Image: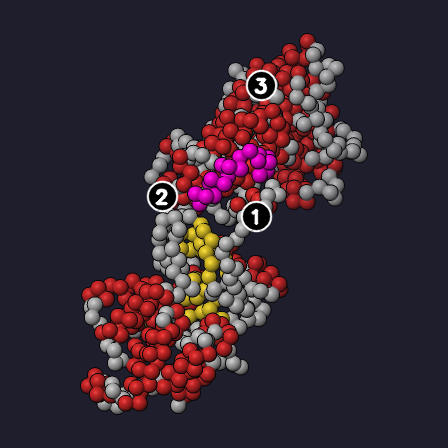
Amino acid sequence: MKKTLINQFEPLTFDEILAKKSAINDDYYLLDVVQHFEEQEDERSHAVTELILRSPDYDEMVDYSELYSSLIDYYLFVENYPSALGWIYARLVATEQHESGADRADSINQLAEVYLCNDDPNTGIRLFIHRIWQNPHDLRTYYAFSYALWLCDLNDLSLEVAQRGLALASKDNDQELLKLLGQFQQEIQEEETDAEMIPEIDQALIAEIRAALCLDANHAIEETEPYLPPLNRLADPNTSHDLTLRDEILAQMRVFAPELIRLAFDENLPSGPAVEQVITLLREMQPALRDEFQEILPWINRADGDWRNELLISSFGKVSGYSTAELRKFAINQEYARNIRTSALEALSERLEKCPEQRSEVVAILREMLTRPELDRASEEFLNGIAIGVILDIDARELFPEIKAVFDQDCVDPTIVSLSDVHKQWGMPLEADTQEKKDGLDLLLECKACGRVRMHFTRYVLVEIGTFDKESEGLEKRYTPYIMDHEIICPKCGAHDNYELTVQSHLNLIAPREPAQLMEFLKGEKPSKPVKTNPRLFYLKSAALGREMHPFEAVEEYRWRIINKPGDAHLHAGFGRLLRLLGHHSEALNELNFAYKLDPRNSEIVINLAMAEHDFGDRARAEELYNKMILLEVKEIDLLNEIANNKPGDERISFGYAVRDGLEALQRGEPSPWFTPIYNSEGKSLVDFLNAKVKVSGASRSQKRRKSRKGK
């Protein structure tokens, strides 16, 4: 995903990126593109940042404040002050809307600095003075104000501001900022201060600066910053209609615009005439503040009526919000990124909490989601699950027929919601489970062919060690290291053994069982002792056709070779053994039977076919084959054939023990003595795991005898 997205942006110019439609990609994934260009010191990183900040996405995993700061700093560096002002205001609105003004001080301080150091120093100074009056103990304001004055060669005033900030500092202040302010004070003192006052500055403001610096050092910090005159009258219903108030505010619009934005989002100011007057004032300011309002103008233009309830959503939209009809467009349109569509759907629950009168409109949107033509597409199954989750949240039981139809069509991502979840939440009787309960694992697997996730049952999982090591090292791999006990066929597209474990299933399988080791695992720490994973996980080093090979690759190789040499009994026999290992029992029997027809006197083929028939085929035929093996062993019918085909001195393998064990097990109704050297983390073999009912102390009898023969 990361590489693909970067490749999409790499050929584009700065302006071409800005021209791209927003909301096509999730903000979180676009961060990878930003980082890619940043590593190349490529300015296009800022174009991608703009694309992120104009998107309706609002992801808790993304630090939007940092993105705003980075973009503003870039435009200040290239001296594009109109764009810098526009993004400062966008950040100001975003932080008031989503974070109750957490970054308000930084935004206004930066705004003041831009004005002070460029075309409007008087406004810059007034904004700084207002910041000091509102919070006289905020070191950020003193540092920003002192630095801006120094940039304008106002060293004496800069020093006064820095010294006052240090005098008001306490142990509760940011120690790093305190250190910077102290270092800056020393630098100013060491610098020559013969610069003259800039003539554009209103001399009366000098007195106002010093008056603000003389605030009582013991002044208690207000829990909420006060609104200063004349805006305190606008916030008061008794004085908000004063006819002179409008003219007084518009006379200093650059100073009061940031506080008007704060008022617009202030939850303590109820919707009504006061908020409407705030929006009216912002609209009147727009022609003069064209640069400042360029990114927030859509919000100002559409903030009518009870807009705070009818537009704003906590998890959707960075600046302003969206109507219910607009949320529908985002949710339905497949062109938009999945995370954005998901957020738009989930926003419907929040919208109903604030606007219950819109219930019929919301229910209609959710019904449309569950009956749209593209419902069955793999890319839509996740959204179907989200829509059902929203229906449960708003308790829209009238949509149960649509929900049931979607599940009947098997069009819901099972990681999101199940039909049982719906029944349980609404207190409905659960449907009878016709499937026999089995002892094993239910694993969510993602089909690599169509992208759908489905639950699959398996008794055990084989882990191919070579592929597992590649995965652990982050190397490219063609096949999954996790192999189920039977062939996995996607119920939607029919793909065979073409799957990956979901993150959830992956953790369920490989996470340690012990709590202490699980904590080490989650922290990425080296285990303090050998880890015991899920006992249904068995490890093998796969080899086939004379070399190390993943079982799925071996299946493909065997099929290719058999096409070219269809009469080779050894190929069919080897393929049959491999298919048995993979749990493809029907195919395994077919291959072993074909090998037997080609070479009915080959002892190894006969014993493998006998044990396969014993375990999952015709048990009567298994007995017949075991008896044939006895004849082969006793009469040595195949001896001449072996002498003709083997080199002198080759040791002939005896299967007598396996035949006798097989016949005894068959008579007792127990599994065959089939053996393969595959073990779990507890040292238990796969055969003993499968044949638990005939397990003796330690290894099985056939296993012990084979090991004994190997030792001899």
Which of the labelled discs sits on residue 304, or is there none?
3
- Is residue 690 depicted above or below 248 in this figure? below
**On the image, which quarter does residue 569 sit in?**
bottom left
The residue labelled by disc 1 is 430
Q: Is residue 370 left or right of residue 138?
A: left
**Front of the two marks 1 and 3:** 1
Between residue 220 and residue 595, name the one nearer to us: 595
- In the image, which residues are magenta? 392-410
The image position of residue 276, as x and y in percent, is 63, 17
Amino acid type at circle 3 is: Asp
Q: Earlier in the sequence, mark 1 or mark 3?
A: 3
- Is residue 600 depicted above or below 230 in this figure? below
The image position of residue 143, as x and y in percent, is 64, 35
Q: Is residue 477 left or right of residue 529?
A: left
Which of the labelled discs sits on residue 7, or is there none?
2
Between residue 333 and residue 572, name the one nearer to us: 572
Question: Residue at the spot x=62%, y=27% of the render?
Answer: 356
Q: Earlier in the sequence, mark 3 or mark 2?
A: 2
**On the image, which quarter does residue 618 sit in?**
bottom left
**On the image, which quarter does residue 397 sit in?**
top right
Q: Is residue 540 left or right of residue 108?
A: left
- Is residue 621 depicted above or below 83 in this figure? below
- Is residue 698 depicted above or below 398 in this figure? below
Between residue 175 and residue 384, name the one nearer to us: 384
Q: CA distance from mark 3 to mark 2?
A: 42 Å
Amino acid type at circle 2 is: Asn
Q: Is residue 151 visible?
A: no
Q: Earlier in the sequence, mark 2 or mark 1?
A: 2
Q: Is residue 634 visible?
A: yes
Amino acid type at circle 1 is: Leu
The image position of residue 121, as x and y in percent, is 59, 23
